[in-house]
Image (cartoon, grey):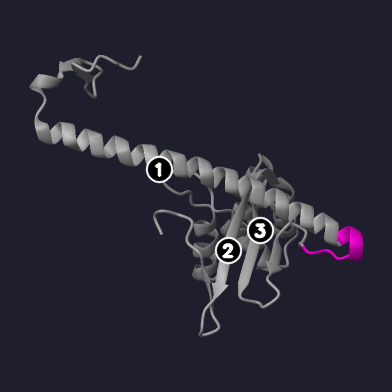
């Protein structure tokens, strides 16, 4: 529970410390941090509201355009680009899907290992390294989806390899998606540059 007694302030461990015993520089730092946080928190709410309304407006316009003209503005993943009449402003709505593999990936890996072991003497070391890298996990223990899917571009005349590639494709699952809004303006050099809406940018 937040302490509201002006004579005391809670420290990082939750202990109440008399304000009179806190150094002035620590009080000034606390005030600055909380003031900036308060403003940032307000802006975060404004940006969240802006994103929600903008996504709704873009979706409504997309549906209106399709209804009036039979046009399909977005791709199969719902990506849409809208341009101002003079071409100076470009809005993009992009949908990024979060993909994971289910247990069938283990079957695919087993079949691939069988192939590699049998081909060991004649297989290119670069191919073996490529396949090994594809199944490496990052620091968070996640597999790289693009690397694994990249294996399907390799064409080997082996029935087990074909079954492994089928298993990879069928094991891929969409578990979520996130919508992004990007706004660009065209500069004098003709290049579109993003309008930064991220404080880190």
Density class for disc 2 (Cα within 10 Å; few <14, some 14-19, many ≥20) is some
Disc 3 and disc 1: Cα gap in Å?
Answer: 25 Å
Q: Which mark is residue 57?
A: none
Which residue is under mark 3?
93
Callout 3: SS: strand
User: From this viewpoint, is residue 166 visible?
Assistant: no
Distance Cα–Cα, label 2 vs label 3: 9 Å
Q: Which of labels 2 and 3 is toward the front?
A: 2
Mark positioned earlier in the residue sequence (1 or 2) = 1
Element at label 2: strand
Looking at the image, which residue sits at the far front? 6
Residue drawn at (84%, 61%), measured in percent from left and top?
A: 65
Q: Earlier in the sequence, mark 3 or mark 1?
A: 1
Residue 181 x, y percent position in the rendering: 60, 56
Direction from residue 105 to residue 67 in the image, left or right: right
The residues bearing labels 1 and 2 have C-alpha atoms spaced at a distance of 21 Å
Instruction: Answer with the quarter of the image where residue 131 lies.
Output: bottom right
Q: Residues within 10 Å of mark 3 (few under 14, many from 20)?
A: many
Which callout, 3 or 1, points to the residue nearer the camera? 1
When the figure is inspected, residue 2 is found, relative to residue 133, above or below; the finding is above
Q: Which label belongs to residue 40?
A: 1
| Magenta part of the chain | 66-73
Picture layout, residue 6 above or below residue 154: above
Q: Is residue 142 magenta?
A: no
Of the image marks 2 and 3, the number of the one nearer the N terminus: 3
Badge 1 local density, few (<14 within 10 Å), some, or many (20+)?
A: few
Q: Where residue 90 appears, x then y in whole percent?
A: 63, 69
Q: Quadrant of the C terminus?
A: bottom left
Residue at 31% x, 38% y is: 35
Q: Which residue is mark 2?
A: 183
Answer with left or right where residue 70 lies relative to residue 114. Answer: right
């Amino acid at each position: 529970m937040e302490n509201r007694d002006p004579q005391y302030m809670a420290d990082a461990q939750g202990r109440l410390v008399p304000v009179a015993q806190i150094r002035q520089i620590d009080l000034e730092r606390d005030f600055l941090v909380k003031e900036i946080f308060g403003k940032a928190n307000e802006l975060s709410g404004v940006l969240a509201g802006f994103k929600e309304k903008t996504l709704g407006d873009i979706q409504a316009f997309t549906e209106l355009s399709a209804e009036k003209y039979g046009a399909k503005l977005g791709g199969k993943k719902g990506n849409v680009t809208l341009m101002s009449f003079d071409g100076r402003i470009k809005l993009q709505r992009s949908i990024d899907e979060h993909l994971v593999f289910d247990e069938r990936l283990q079957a695919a890996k087993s079949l691939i290992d069988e192939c590699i072991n049998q081909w060991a003497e004649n297989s290119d070391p670069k191919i073996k390294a490529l396949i090994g890298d594809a199944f490496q996990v990052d620091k968070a223990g996640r597999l790289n989806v693009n690397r694994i899917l990249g294996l399907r571009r390799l064409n080997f005349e082996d029935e087990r390899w074909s079954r492994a590639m089928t298993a990879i494709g069928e094991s891929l699952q969409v578990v979520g998606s996130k919508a992004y809004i990007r706004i660009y303006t065209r500069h004098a050099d003709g290049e579109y540059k993003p309008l930064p809406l991220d404080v880190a940018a």
